[in-house]
Amino acid sequence: MVDQATLARLLSLIAGGDEAALASFYKLTSGAIFFRIKTILRDRTLAEDVVQEIYVSVWRYALSFDPALGSPSTWLGAIAKNQTLRFIRARGAPLLEEDAAALDDLVDPSPSPLEHAVASAEIRALKNCLDQLDGAARSALLLAFYGSHSYADVARLMGEPEGTVKSRIRRALARLKRCLEQ
């Protein structure tokens, strides 16, 4: 989850004309916004266009952000909702009920208490299953998936042949899957 204080600080800098702050704000927030808008519009290119308009609005209206009225994520979500609605209306497309609900989610993108509980339980289960793997398998898996290393990188880091690392990761994933399915 993105730190709201950081986003508020960036919005303050953006309001002062800091382009680097806008780039940082975009980097921190655009992935989630893009995903939600693409889900609503069901078209990557259209979603990219809307996201571009959203961040143009962020640049133009950053001075209007007031932390006393809500969080930066809520402010950004409201802009995203308005831009998406404007786009849908301009195309003359009907707004489906599930899309309207998804638009409402843009305004308050924070996870619900239920989503927090589910995520917490899933994380505990994953940690438990990872703890059941032997050290080498666990290390290889963590380097590959959490460290974003390629098989070749993992092999080099572990000082082992790439084929061995690939097999170890494949077996570890299978064990992890079985453990998580229990």
Image (spheres, rainbow, N blue to C red):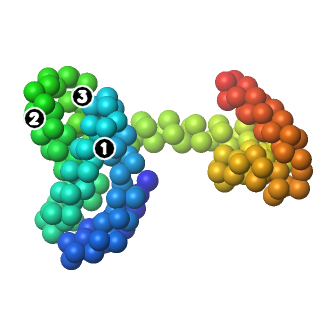
Tag 3, which secondary structure?
helix
Q: Position of residue 180 (x, y in %)?
A: 67, 29
Q: CA distance from mark 3 to mark 2?
A: 16 Å
Q: Name the amino acid type tagged 3.
A: Asp
Instruction: Answer whether labels 3 and 2 touch (C-beta < 8 Å).
Output: no
Residue drawn at point x = 65 percent, y = 51 percent? 148
For mark 3, what is the residue? 99
Instruction: Answer whether labels 2 and 1 touch (C-beta < 8 Å).
Output: no
* Mark closest to the chain's N terminus, 3 or 1: 1
Residue drawn at point x = 31 percent, y = 29 percent? 42
Q: Position of residue 43 (x, y in %)?
A: 31, 31
User: Does residue 138 lie above or below 76 as drawn?
Assistant: above
For mark 2, what is the residue? 90
Q: Position of residue 60 (x, y in %)?
A: 15, 63
Q: CA distance from mark 2 to mark 1?
A: 16 Å
Q: Residues within 10 Å of mark 1 (few under 14, many from 20)?
A: some
